[in-house]
């Protein structure tokens, strides 16, 4: 066949002209195939293939030309196979015919096209054609042309490669699986050499450009390994033939780009089961790579690949009832005793044979990598450690000694090395160490896993405050999210040591985190009250470090202590009564700290009242009396406005009224003091209302319990009369009338309670006086005036948006008296209105 271009002449023309020639030749070839002119079709196809010698094209342009040309060759190959099957032409004859093409490159493309079509026929001489094609491709040594030529050979022979195993019955003409392996290995070796040689095409100033172009062409070489991985070979063939041949070529090429890429491909394309058996070869290869190769992603890729393999296999086993990896981690309960963990089967042991000792093997190779690569950066070391730690955590969670090796390495080989202190101050490295510390926290629902790693806390404590703060926040979030109960005192102490960085930070941005710590207290619980009180003491000792922010933390401790007092009584441990007394002392100490350091007078008063109430319920009147005394002290010392004083006095009154276990003298002392405080309020309406509430202290309500009620009718009457006197002295007529109506309601209440000092004549006189004041108000202050200016007669107690109207008060008075009149059937109530 004759070509339009001389056989050995190079071509140098733009891509557009080359593609135009190829398109024209392709159209002519199509017409020749349709008319059965096979020789003319070969001739026109050769014209297109001659353009593959164009030296003016970049690798990207050459790839575009290659894709167009191979599509033309594909159509030619399909037509030739059809002619062979219908008996028109025999492909073996055509294979010999195309070898007479004058130019080497077109000849080889045509030979591959015809030969690959022939390989798919039933009686093909597969082995002979394979050997012939692979040998003939050696005739093109131009790096770019040879690379694409061998890639075409690889893609075209994909379907025709023999897959039969080696045995005595194998047909020598068809070839075997190992013949395919040798074919692909030889093609891989030659393609890699051509790929490496591309960097030497042209001057040194274009070296970076050529490196970028090589990076774009690397998939052509990697496809050989992909094709190899798709063959059905066994472990022996992979370990003894395939992998050693690949590794030899990777190491000997000494090219950093080729070594890094091909090592990554080895990791990614071959089966995980074979990687487990050949880790020694893989890591020894990494150690022998060029010093300029970044081995970090190569090590991480293998570790992540093995971790993912265990996860997939565990998920597959979950259908058999063994449980997935996630279920194993969620249900994981670690004990302090080593015997418990030894009896549990780790996910890695279910998937990987324990005989391989994969944990020891991997850790040994990781350490060897660090020792052999003295120039490896600290950031790369931490990344690799993070990956191996993730492998240990996911695959061997019950064997904590392996995960602890990582933290031990960090502690001894990184944190304690004086020469590395400057690097440890880098923000990127700090973030990497933070990620490592977060791995066991995030992976497992129980923080006790981290506490079972002896070197975890030393590594944590060596981090700067900002890193420890972020880690502590994550610990809090995970414990609360998983609702994990921490019951051991030692675990609580270590946990508080972790979150102490939040407690001791007095910034305003920590308030939400402090509230989260307060929530955490509810998850620190032991069923034994004696251990629980020790936990609460530990909490108090740590919380006092919060300074003024202690007001966000100590109240929950106080509440837990108060409720713990009942548990002590119910548990009835040895000397439980004495322990409860110690507990009440502890409650008092916590509230004193809160009052002195937390700037929380109102909160302290509320806690004292709550403690007094619970102490009285648990029949500890001496402590209840002391707590009320402390509440009175806070009430006296706090600089509060009149409104807060009135509200706090109401709280004290309400709690005192519920008490049932005080002696008469103690109770009388407390309620007398409370009544005295009410009489000394700043505003007269507040005084009146305060004394009205205090009157209930002298007349306790009946309860279901069999207790002696404290009732003093005389003092009740004195309180009511004092209130009347104060109400009458108010200058504001509306406020005075409103107070009179409230006092009348109290008279009715005590009269209903059969208080001896409250007589019918007193109530009748008060009704007349109240109605007289109502008439006086209507006469002196018309209703329309009040409606127009509702705030004109506002009081300090009844400040409402709508103000008051005379009609509303008149209706209130009428409802109050009508309610009493409805009970006139009773002689006692009828005497009021006589």
Image: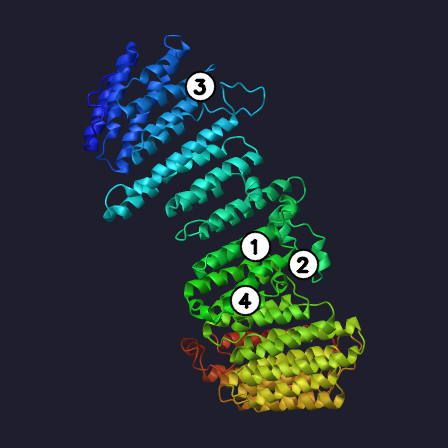
> Mark 2 or mark 1, which has the lower sequence index?
2
Q: Can residue 773 be seen in this view?
A: no
Foreground mark, 2 or 1?
Answer: 1
- Give the quadrant of residue 593: bottom right
Residue at image position (29%, 42%) is 200
- Circle 3 is placed at which residue position? 120
Secondary structure, mark 1, is helix
| In this view, 623 is above or below 85 | below
- How far across and down, in percent of the image, does residue 194 sit? 34, 37
On residue 334, the disc is 2
Q: Distance between the residues labelled 1 and 4?
A: 16 Å
Secondary structure, mark 4, is helix
| In this view, 132 is above or below 392 | above
Task: Report the coloring of the rendering.
Answer: rainbow
- How far across and down, in percent of the image, does residue 39 sit? 28, 13
Q: Circle 2: is it few (<14), some (14-19), or many (20+) Cα within 10 Å?
A: some
Residue at image position (44%, 63%) is 429
- Circle 4 is placed at which residue position? 412
**Label pair 3/1, CB-CB below 8 angstroms:** no
Q: Distance between the residues labelled 3 and 1?
A: 48 Å
């Amino acid at each position: 066949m004759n070509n339009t271009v001389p056989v050995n002449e190079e071509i140098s023309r733009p891509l557009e002209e080359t593609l135009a020639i190829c398109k024209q030749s392709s159209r002519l070839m199509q017409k020749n195939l349709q008319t059965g002119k096979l020789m003319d079709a070969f001739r026109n196809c050769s014209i297109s293939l001659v353009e593959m010698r164009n030296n003016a094209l970049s690798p990207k342009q050459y790839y575009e030309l290659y894709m167009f040309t191979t599509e033309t060759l594909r159509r030619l190959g399909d037509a030739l196979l059809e002619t062979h099957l219908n008996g028109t032409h025999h492909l073996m004859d055509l294979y010999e015919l195309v070898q007479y093409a004058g130019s080497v490159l077109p000849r080889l493309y045509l030979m591959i096209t015809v030969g690959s079509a022939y390989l798919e026929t039933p009686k093909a001489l597969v082995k002979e054609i394979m050997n012939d094609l692979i040998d003939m491709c050696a005739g093109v040594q131009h790096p770019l042309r040879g690379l694409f030529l061998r890639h075409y050979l690889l893609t075209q022979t994909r379907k025709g490669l023999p897959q039969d195993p080696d045995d005595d019955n194998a047909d020598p003409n068809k070839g075997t699986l190992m013949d395919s392996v040798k074919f692909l290995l030889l093609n891989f070796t030659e393609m890699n050499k051509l790929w490496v040689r591309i960097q030497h095409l042209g001057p040194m100033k274009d070296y970076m450009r050529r490196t970028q172009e090589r990076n774009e062409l690397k998939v052509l070489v990697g496809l050989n390994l992909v094709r190899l991985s798709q063959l059905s070979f066994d472990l022996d063939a992979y370990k003894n033939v395939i992998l050693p041949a690949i590794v030899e070529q990777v190491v000997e090429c000494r090219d950093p780009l080729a070594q890094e890429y091909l090592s990554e491909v080895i990791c990614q394309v071959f089966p995980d089961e074979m990687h487990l058996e050949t880790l020694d070869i893989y890591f020894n290869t990494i150690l022998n790579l060029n010093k300029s190769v970044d081995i970090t992603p190569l090590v991480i890729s293998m570790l992540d690949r093995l971790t993912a393999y265990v996860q997939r296999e565990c998920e597959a086993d979950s259908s058999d009832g063994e449980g997935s990896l996630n279920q194993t981690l969620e249900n994981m309960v670690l004990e302090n005793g080593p015997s418990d963990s030894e009896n549990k089967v780790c996910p890695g042991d279910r998937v990987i044979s324990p005989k391989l000792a994969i944990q020891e093997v991997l850790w040994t190779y990781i350490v060897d990598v660090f020792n052999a690569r003295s120039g490896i950066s600290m950031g790369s070391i931490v990344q690799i450690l993070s990956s191996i730690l993730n492998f240990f955590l996911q695959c061997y969670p019950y064997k904590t000694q392996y995960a602890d090796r990582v933290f031990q390495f960090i502690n001894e080989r990184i944190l304690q090395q004086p020469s590395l202190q400057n690097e440890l101050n880098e923000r990127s490295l700090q973030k990497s160490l933070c990620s490592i510390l977060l791995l066991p926290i995030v992976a497992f629902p129980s923080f006790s896993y981290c506490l079972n790693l002896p070197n975890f806390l030393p590594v944590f404590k060596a981090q700067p405050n900002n890193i420890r703060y972020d880690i502590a926040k994550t610990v809090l979030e995970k414990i609360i999210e998983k609702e994990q109960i921490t019951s051991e005192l030692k675990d609580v102490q270590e946990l508080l040591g972790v979150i102490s960085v939040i407690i001791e930070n007095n910034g305003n941005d920590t308030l939400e985190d402090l509230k989260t710590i307060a929530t955490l207290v509810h998850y620190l619980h032991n069923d034994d009250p004696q251990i629980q009180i020790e936990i609460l003491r530990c909490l108090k000792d740590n919380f006092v470090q919060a300074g003024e922010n202690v007001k966000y933390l100590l109240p929950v401790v106080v509440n837990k202590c108060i409720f713990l007092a009942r548990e002590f009584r119910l548990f009835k441990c040895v000397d439980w009564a004495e322990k409860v007394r110690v507990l009440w002392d502890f409650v008092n100490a916590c509230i004193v700290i809160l009052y002195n350091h937390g700037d929380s007078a109102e909160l302290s008063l509320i806690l004292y009242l709550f403690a007094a109430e619970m102490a009285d319920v648990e029949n500890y009147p001496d402590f209840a009396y002391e707590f009320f005394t402390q509440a009175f002290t806070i009430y006296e010392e706090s600089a509060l406005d009149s409104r807060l004083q009135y509200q706090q006095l109401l709280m004290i009154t309400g709690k005192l009224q519920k008490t049932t276990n005080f002696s008469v003298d103690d109770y009388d002392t407390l309620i007398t003091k409370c009544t005295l405080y009410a009489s000394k309020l700043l505003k007269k309406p507040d005084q009146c209302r305060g004394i009205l509430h205090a009157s209930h202290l002298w007349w306790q309500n009946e309860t279901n319990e069999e207790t002696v009620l404290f009732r003093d009718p005389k003092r009740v009457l004195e309180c009511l009369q004092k209130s009347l006197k104060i109400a009458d002295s108010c200058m504001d007529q509306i406020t005075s009338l409103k107070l009179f109506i409230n006092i009348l309601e109290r008279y009715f209440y005590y009269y209903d309670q059969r208080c001896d000092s409250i007589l019918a004549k007193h109530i009748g006189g008060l009704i007349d006086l109240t109605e007289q004041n109502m008439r006086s108000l209507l006469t002196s202050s018309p209703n329309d005036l009040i409606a127009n200016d509702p705030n004109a007669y506002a009081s300090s107690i009844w400040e409402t948006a709508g103000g008051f109207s005379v009609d509303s008060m008149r209706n209130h008075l009428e409802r109050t008296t009508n309610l009493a009149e409805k009970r006139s059937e009773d002689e006692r109530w009828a005497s009021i209105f006589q």
